[in-house]
Image (cartoon, rainbow, N blue to C red):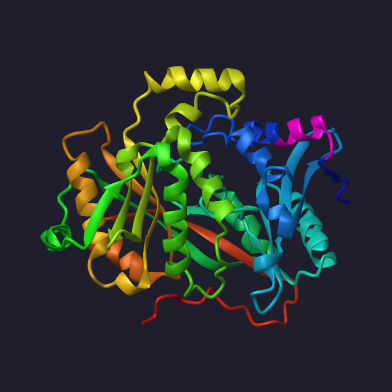
């Protein structure tokens, strides 16, 4: 008989237990980097997370007979997105569990019951109650590749726990990699030169002092570029500003650029330094002392990797080689002139094969793979993968 007990996270002791569990799960795993406690807590803070204006979430811990914490999970409903699917779909995330299927079932069942009681008929996971640039997906291939900032990491047995419960892959998340100093294919350099010589185009790097202006430029291109996605929901101005302000402490102005046509933003490339080598030394806590340590460690810890967070091109300017022009321009700024050695594109969904083709054509290789899973509550319903975007 399973005597493990689920408890809602509702006080400081529960919150501490929620954050302490991963230190037990990953004890001795050198590849694991603790998630920043404050960033995780922001997800569950109604004053800080804008998604509470159109959704709700809940989280729980799992306790065994010895009063040990052996699992945790959160469930989310983003009302703007949930009802855009054939089956109203919520999500689960921040899942951690010992290698015990009964314990995992207890967590999954509890999240499923909460979601179903709120009108959901399916759940995706692991996802975030927020944007998909953090805390999104389950690592399923190449557990030895160093994780990047914001990436989920997990033991290999998690995949079995999800699949045994009945989750199926909704889409794969491909993590692309290349060396900074590897040459850009000549055809992209030529396209870059053509764009640079065209007086109607310009490529400009970000200025942090005008960060709200660039947040709005990002939003305008993002909303135009992703509108063809089957489940797209327009990004609000406040959300774009929030994303950029959260990144502000680690932004390197050389790594964020925009392409303008007659001074109108038509493309962007958003990259940040991979600060995981620093965060690994902070034990997941960016409190006042942690922030002081971060400032000091920035002077001594080598940051050699760039994280490609997002790239987008306005549909009217696609198929002109602008993506290649962006990478060619980035290479000119960094090759042989910076501390950076390699770049990781955080993930490209396999529902976007055209974007993946561009990265591979530029010289990226798929270094590891994650997955977003979906569980349909009615097992008689036919499961469908995420629809392909940019088909034409």
- Asked whether residue 52 appears in the rendered view, the answer is yes
Residue beneath the point at 22% across and 60% down: 201
Q: The C terminus appears in which quarter of the rendering?
A: bottom left
Main SS category, magenta section: helix
Quadrant in which residue 272 is drawn: top left
Residue beneath the point at 81% across and 56% down: 110
Q: Position of residue 233 (x, y in %)?
A: 57, 67
Towards the viewer: 370 or 343: 343
Towards the viewer: 158 or 341: 341
- How many marks on residues? 0
Q: Position of residue 147 (x, y in %)?
A: 45, 41
Towards the viewer: 85 or 109: 85
* Above or below: residue 111 compared with residue 306: below
* Above or below: residue 270 compared with residue 87: above
Find out whether residue 32 is within the magenta segment.
Answer: no
Q: Which residues are drawn in magenta? A: 10-18
Q: Position of residue 279 (x, y in %)?
A: 50, 29
Q: Position of residue 369 (x, y in %)?
A: 44, 56
Q: Horizontally, is 330 left or right of 344 in the view?
A: left
Q: Horizontally, is 286 left or right of 110 in the view?
A: left
- Asked whether residue 363 appears in the rendered view, the answer is no
* Above or below: residue 206 compared with residue 89: above
Find out whether residue 14 is within the magenta segment.
Answer: yes
Residue beneath the point at 63% across and 33% down: 37
Residue beneath the point at 53% across and 44% down: 153
């Amino acid at each position: 008989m399973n005597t493990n007990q689920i408890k809602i996270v509702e006080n400081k002791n529960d919150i501490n237990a929620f954050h302490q569990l991963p230190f037990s799960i990953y004890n001795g795993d050198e590849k694991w980097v603790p998630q920043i406690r404050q960033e995780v807590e922001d997800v569950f803070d109604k004053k800080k997370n804008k998604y509470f204006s159109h959704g709700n979430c809940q989280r729980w811990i799992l306790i065994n007979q010895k009063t040990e914490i052996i699992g945790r999970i959160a469930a989310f409903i983003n009302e703007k997105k949930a009802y855009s699917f054939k089956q109203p779909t919520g999500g689960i995330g921040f899942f951690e569990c010992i290698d015990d299927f009964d314990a995992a079932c207890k967590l999954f069942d509890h999240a499923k019951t909460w979601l179903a009681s709120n009108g959901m008929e399916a759940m995706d996971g692991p996802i975030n109650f927020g944007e998909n640039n953090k805390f999104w997906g389950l690592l399923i291939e190449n557990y030895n590749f160093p994780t990047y900032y914001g990436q989920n990491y997990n033991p290999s047995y998690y995949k079995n726990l999800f699949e045994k419960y009945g989750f199926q892959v909704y889409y794969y998340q491909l993590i692309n990699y290349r060396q900074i100093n590897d040459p850009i294919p000549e055809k992209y350099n030529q396209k870059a030169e053509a764009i640079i010589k065209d007086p109607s185009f310009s490529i400009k790097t970000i200025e942090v002092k005008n960060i709200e202006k660039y947040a709005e430029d990002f939003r305008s291109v993002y909303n135009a570029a992703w509108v063809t996605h089957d489940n797209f929901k327009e990004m609000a101005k406040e959300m774009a500003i929030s994303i950029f302000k959260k990144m502000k402490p680690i932004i390197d102005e050389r790594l964020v650029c925009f392409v303008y046509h007659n001074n109108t933003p038509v493309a962007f490339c958003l990259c940040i330094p991979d600060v995981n080598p620093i965060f690994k030394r902070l034990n997941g806590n960016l409190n006042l002392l942690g922030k002081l340590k971060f400032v000091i460690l920035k002077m001594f810890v080598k940051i050699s990797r760039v994280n490609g967070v997002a790239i987008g091109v306005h549909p009217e300017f696609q198929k002109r080689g602008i993506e290649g022009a962006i990478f060619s321009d980035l290479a000119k700024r960094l090759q042989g002139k910076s501390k950076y050695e390699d770049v990781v594109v955080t993930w490209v969904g396999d529902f976007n094969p055209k974007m993946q083709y561009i990265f591979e054509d530029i010289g990226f290789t798929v270094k590891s793979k994650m997955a977003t899973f979906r569980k349909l509550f009615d097992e008689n319903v036919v499961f469908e993968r995420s629809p392909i975007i940019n088909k034409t």
